[in-house]
Image (spheres, grey):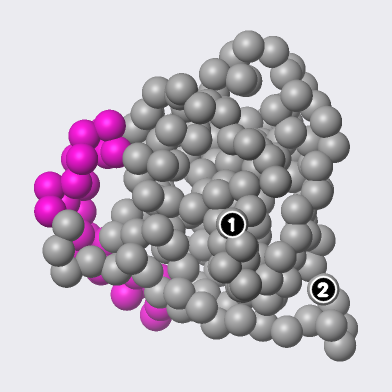
Amino acid sequence: MSTLPANGSVRPITRWGEDVMHRLNQPVTDFGDELQTLVADMVATMIAAEGVGLAANQVGVDLQVFVFDCPDADGNHVQGVVCNPVIHLPEGKDRRLDEGDEGCLSLPGAFTKCVRPDFARVTGVDQHGEPVSYEGTGLLARCLQHETDHTQGTVFGDRLSRKYRKRLFAEAEEFAPEYPADWPVSPMAVHEGHHEESQAT
C-alpha cells in the first residue's frame, strides 16, 4: 500500500464548466518540488471534501495526475498517486458492467447511476516518477476510471444519457447553496438530507 503525502493545504475545488475540466490535460514531465506540493495539497483537499479520489484539474491545475484513497469490493482501502494514467478495461467475455451510483466533487451533492466496467487497472508513474499499477473491482474500479477520465477532460456527466444528465444537474442545483465557492476550504453550510459524500471523486 502506498502512503499518501501529508501536510498539504486544502485548495478550492474547481467545478464542472471550467475549461480545465473539459480538455485533455498536460502530461507530467517535471517531478520536482512543485509537483510534490500539488500532490500533498490534492490529498488534503480530497480528505477535507470526504472524497475517494481527486484529479489535478479539480483544483484548477492542467496536469495528468490524480490521488485516491478508496475501498475495493472487499472493503480493502487502496491509496496512491498516479501521473500520466492509462486505463486498462476488460473486453469481450471478461467485460461485465456495473450500474452503480457515481458522484463528482466538482459537481457536489449530486449522484446518479453511471454504467462502467466492474474491473479496472490503471498504470502510470507516481509523484517521484516510479512506475505504479493499481487494479480492483467495485468502487475502486469506478474511482480509477473516473479519475483517469478527468485527466482526459471527461466528466462522468459526459457518459450519461441526456435524461440522466438533466436530472443530475437539477440535483446539483438543489444542493448548490450548501457549497461555498471555495469549498472545501470553507465547510458546507449544512450536512443533512445528503447522499454519502465519501463516494464522490
Foreground of the two, 99 or 154: 99
The reply to whether the magenta stretch includes residue 36 is no
Estimate the x, y position of residue 52 in percent, counting from the top left.
49, 53
Q: Is residue 104 above or below residue 95?
A: above
Q: Is residue 6 above or below residue 121?
A: above
Total number of numbered discs in the rendering: 2
**Extreme top residue here?**
33
Secondary element at image label 1: strand
Q: Alpha carbon of mark 1 to alpha carbon of mark 2: how far?
A: 22 Å
Query: Which residue is at a point 61% across and 81% down the rendered structure image?
Result: 98
Mark 2: few/some/many CA within 10 Å (<14, 14-19, 20+): some
Residue type for callout 2: Pro
Query: Which residue is at a point 73% across and 84% down the rendered structure image?
Result: 96
Q: Which residue is mark 1?
A: 77
State the image quarter where residue 137 is shown: bottom right
Secondary element at image label 2: loop
Estimate the x, y position of residue 161 in percent, counting from the top left.
49, 77
Q: Is residue 11 above or below residue 51?
A: above
**Nearer the N terminus, badge 1 or badge 2?**
1
Q: Which residue is mark 2?
A: 90
Query: Which residue is at a point 29% across and 60% down the rendered structure image?
Result: 109
Q: Which residues are magenta?
A: 163-190
Is residue 190 visible in this depiction of the protein? yes
State the image quarter where residue 18 is shown: top left
The reply to whether the magenta stretch includes residue 183 is yes
Q: What label sits on residue 54 in the rendered view?
A: none
